[in-house]
Amino acid sequence: MEFLFGFLTDPFFWEVVVSGLLAGVMYSLVALGFVLIFKASGIFNFAQGVLALFAALTLVGFLGGQLPFSHVINWILGTEWHHWYEPPSDEDGAPLWFVLLSIALTTGVMIGMAWVIVRVVLRPLVNQEGIILFMATIGLAFVLEGIGDLMWGANVKVLDVGLPNGPSDWIIDTTGMFVEKLEISAAVVAIILVTALTLFSQYTKMGRALRAVADDHQAALSVGISLETIWWIVWSVAGIVALVAGIMWGAKSGVQFSLSLIALKALPVLMLGGFTSIPGAIVGGLIIGMGEKLFDFYIGVEYLGGATENWFAYVLALLFLLFRPQGLFGEKIIERV
Amino acid sequence: MSTPEVAAAAETDSEYAHKEIDHGLNPRRIGDVIMDIRNITMRFGGVTAIKDVSFDIREGEIRAIIGPNGAGKSSMLNVINGFYHPQEGEIWFHGQKRANLKPYQIAKQGIARTFQNIALFRGMSTLDNIMTGRLTKMRGPAMTWLNEFVARTRGKVGWADSLSRDADVDAVEQAMDFAFSGDNFDIDLTSLATRLITWGPRVIAGTVDLSVEAIYFGHAERQEIEHREKVEHIIDFLEIQAIRKTPVGRLPYGLQKRVELGRALAAEPKLLLLDEPMAGMNVEEKQDMCRFILDVNDEFGTTIALIEHDMGVVMDIADRVVVLDYGSKIGDGTPDEVRANKAVIDAYLGVSHD
Amino acid sequence: MLYREAGEFKTSYQADLATFPIRADLWAFWITIAAAFLVVPWFVNDYWEQAIFLPFFIYGLAALGLNILTGYCGQVSLGTGGFMAVGAYAAYKLMTSFTGLDMISITILSGLITAGVGILFGLPSLRIKGFYLAVATLAAQFFLIWMFNKWGWFYNYSASGQISAPERTMFGVAITGAETHPAVTYLFCLSFLFVFAWVARNLVRGRVGRSWMAIRDMDIAAEIIGVNPLMAKLTAFAVSSFYIGMSGALYFALWKGAAEGTEAFPINVSFNVLFMIILGGLGSILGSLIGAAFISLLPVIFKVLLVEALGWPTDIAQHTQIIFVGALIIVFLIAEPHGIAALWRTAKEKLRLWPFPH
């Protein structure tokens, strides 16, 4: 008991917990995109992380007025073009209207891309086995990564959409803990997003159609729901979720390729939470975010040489799955022959 | 419970021999009870799929299980071949009470089956599909030697007994089930520990056998040819020579059903379970399938338990019929008896249950 | 007209089971092998060895391994990089601890050690299926690489954290180190690929191979007809890891001569090997080799063709290559899920009937 109290009164413990939880929110954001697509189309979208990277890259491009494919264009035409407009700025950086406009434009790009993905990749693969679709999305991840690099360049970029930065003074004053303002805003955004998605799927006609498709493709088709439209919408929503995740991750640690690797961690989050559960994605993200920070802080650094965050999430999910293959919130599967 | 049943069974036998003579065929050898199913109850969550069902299957007979949709027929087959483990009840096979074995172990005891929705290996040819049916009969030289060693020393050298492969549930698997519990397997920790220790020789034997397969020429090739001959015999029997090398995915439905029967036959089963072997077939295909089933029963003396919806077929080919409705047994006996059974007529003609 | 048999003349099951039923194929096969073993070594130079042959042979072994697991047994793995690292570090530890061991034993022992690790990570496959398992294998990838990076024992506490292959000779000829003649490493790796491709072919056509394929095509039915799923999956994991481990050992000792876990065996290696078998053909021995040749040679082709011949900037060529590979994966999954090997087979079938297709 005393051992436990020692933890609970240790301010470091709480700081690790809070930073873990907030990191977990980030994982949840990416995981959310996976869940949406998996629920509606049964596709395990490996490219979700790259989608977030691509969205963040595009947003940086719009904010900076960068010319897409400038590298290629300049090489072909021998020109020196880099920008197609001068981004407006006032003393605080980019003005709000411009940030919002850029986000809207990026959203448009993501919706357009969702359409292309559905037409070119998914439609020809309807009725294929899940594992084939899974491998196709790995291919898609490579295509998107390559295109992103060609369009906007492969260097690390700074993303500044005017989100508050630095530690929150109010929290330091009241509790003595360092908590990044950015992470708090990420948490707030995540809550808003989840609420909105839940309302959307419960109370709108489109949401009901989505759930119908998730339950049974054939049945949904036979009552006149267009599978392609539904997929397009789902991939668009997933693209927007990816954009949000990309903004948060990008604002935190810069927009670069490693972002898509961090996003891989959403996979163990899903294994923990179950592939079809939105609350599962959130809870799974929080558990993994918190678990890996605590493990590294108390065991990893001391006994194992540190950097255990690289694998902790995967091993945790693996062990968990051995005991409960359907995840935290999934239903128990009865196999039939 | 059991007395009228035994009487009914005795009656069946005499009547049966009589019937066969009428048809001008050899009287078949209907032997003792090969499988005795006692008081099986199977629940899924809150749903009871099988309620306290008992019946037996005699050696050499064709036993039909009939009943309306959702009566628990397929669940019953799944219980018999170990895919489901019932909460209550016992299964006696060859006079021994059967432990909770895994399906593949039950297959090794000589129970083979076909499936309601065809479950062929789509990536493989007809020949390869039927060859997989022989897997229970194929074994590498080192494992054969080990098993013979165990058989020779049985009772003489204590530790050698625990090496036996077929005697018990596979040790590693049991350990896994134990560690990640959730499955209701009976676990005896001390025997588990001894078996895990003696697993070493089996791993070595397995590795040697893998190397034998890797070299191919010699033992593996001989074994392949030996089993190929048996499989070719089945192919001839089912008249599917022409589609030997065709990937099964390209075959029409009726032929796929036939290949599936071939795969089950390749295991040379003592008890063959057929789950709706004629579902979705046209009259001609049904006739063919009936003939194959009767021929299997006649020529190989295989005991057959089958589920079928076509009453005409059932009444023609079955020796005895058990009728399920809402998971309970409502009738059991010869086709004629079942046809006259009030409860069965009600169930089929849809008298209201209340 | 020449490329066919004139009817069904097989008189024994043995003849029916042959790998090359058509005589022309058998000849072509042996002529290729003879040329590879007897002619090429006289001409091979450093560039061809380092940029073309060794990558092909070594990734060929890895692709064979992954194809056994994924293509034949149906278990998708994203841990190939991690298992290659196990092979590489096992080879390093063996070379530095037992200086008397020859390179053949070291390679095979490294493979066996990797097989052990593979079995360990294969155990969950009994309970986890499909892409759940694929994600679970990521645990192997990230954990193993982390371990080789952090735990000094594996790299003998060298200051750089790198492992480098000590110089070894075989039959009095240098086989590792700077003095090695390209023909030596060429022949060594080629022999391994040849022998183990043949072994793989034997495994997949017999008892073990059928139990793998049964599990792949329908695991429940397989179990019900008598395949022990644990044994089938674990042997697939073991054999697959054995191949991948050997390829890791050769990668480190013969090809690169030095390696650092995080740089040499990142997750991209896992993807690349997976791409090899998808493009080459899932469940095909020939496909593994075609895929390995294709993906490992692609950077060379892009460099020679786009950068050197057409003058493309290096980074654009690189990005284009990534897009090209990804797009090719999608195209193949859509149009020909059985890969280049299936195209090749179809072409041969056509040729067999030519010029009278009906």
Image (tube, helix red, strand yellow):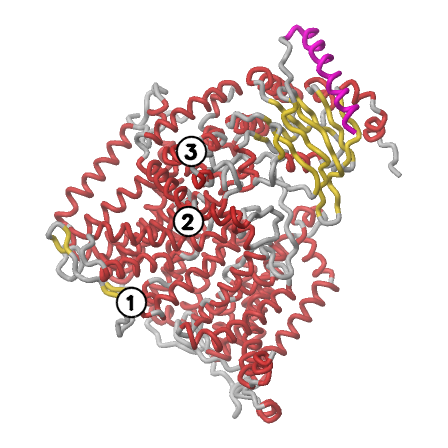
Residue C120: percent from left, percent from top = 43, 54
The residue type indicated by label 3 comes to Thr
Residue B307: percent from left, percent from top = 68, 29
Is residue B19 found inside the magenta-colored segment of the image? yes
Residue A176: percent from left, percent from top = 57, 90
Q: Is residue B322 left or right of residue C167?
A: right
Task: Give the residue pinned by disc 3.
Answer: B153
Discs 3, 2: same chain: no
Looking at the picture, does residue C357 appear above or below residue A126? above
Q: Is residue C246 left or right of residue B88?
A: left
The residue type indicated by label 1 comes to Tyr
Task: Give the residue pinned by disc 2.
Answer: C237
At mark 1, the secondary structure is helix
Instruction: Work out which residue is located at the far front of the displayed protein and give it.
Output: B156
Magenta stretch, residue numbers: B1-25
Local crowd at mark 1 within 10 Å, few (<14), some, or many (≥20)?
many
